[in-house]
Image (cartoon, grey):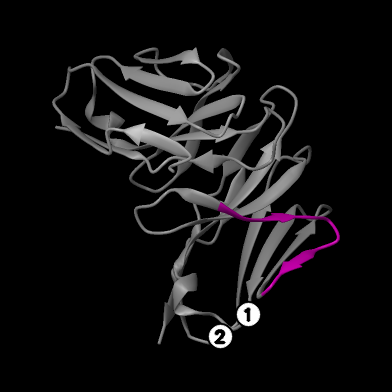
Amino acid sequence: RKEVEQDPGPFNVPEGATVAFNCTYSNSASQSFFWYRQDCRKEPKLLMSVYSSGNEDGRFTAQLNRASQYISLLIRDSKLSDSATYLCVVKNYGGSQGNLIFGKGTKLSVKP
Amino acid sequence: DTAVSQTPKYLVTQMGNDKSIKCEQNLGHDTMYWYKQDSKKFLKIMFSYNNKELIINETVPNRFSPKSPDKAHLNLHINSLELGDSAVYFCASSRRQTSNEQYFGPGTRLTVT
């Protein structure tokens, strides 16, 4: 079982739609959680961190459920520029301190 | 100014050759990383250096040898290239070993023929 699992998609949605991505992680000791965004043939960039209380950044809302080991990302009012691959990322501490574990990503395509 | 830069951007070479990829960051960060993203888009850590000292060495063939001449540079040398080494290699850096955000370079697309 992979340490971080995501639905690979693609999610094809019209502009203005609300779309949700889910992610599960297997290591209950994982301490920090993130969503990164990767545009086609580009490098990953941090979109937002994910906190236990849930957090929002404009149209983006991230949530974490530690009991279920589940992370989500909600995008409201999708824009064409949101088209990208969204990577769920967890960070473990201890033996591999500072080690980011990436999911394979969920591809989003927003159409006019 | 580019924060994390890599050279070359594209590298096409034959099996059995030895090649190097260079990475530099001008952010003053202490920690640098090499990741491999394979054809299935799976991004996986290879190495991590903190202040020129190796701190993470995942299960990577010993044909891959990182070298950090100073904390702003982390180069990757690959010996006896194989077809399976074809991938995009990303360098990244973070302020400290414990920092959450990592800044990635643009990637080096390696094709082994």
The residue at 60%/82% (across/down) is A18
Instruction: Tell me the quarter of the image containing the C terminus of chain B.
Output: top left
- Indicate whether B88 appears above or below A95: below
Judging depth in this view, the residue of A67 and B30 nearest the camera is B30
- Toward which corner of the image does residue B14 lie, by quadrant? top left
Element marked by disc 2: loop
Residue B103 percent coordinates (x, y): 54, 41
Query: Hey, which residue is sitting farthest front in the picture?
Result: B1
The residue where tag 2 is placed is A17
Q: Tell me which residue sits at (70%, 36%) in the image.
A: B99
Looking at numbered disc 2 in the image, what kind of residue is underneath it?
A: Ala
Question: Would you call the spot at circle 2 few (<14 residues within 10 Å), some (14-19), or many (20 or more)?
Answer: some
Q: Which mark is residue A76?
A: 1
**Which region of the structure is painted magenta?**
A46-58
| Chain that bears disc 1 | A
Magenta highlight: main SS: strand
The residue type indicated by label 1 comes to Arg
Q: Quadrant of residue B21?
A: top left
The percent position of residue A27, horizontal first and vertical second, equals: 72, 40
Quick check: A104 above or below B29?
A: below
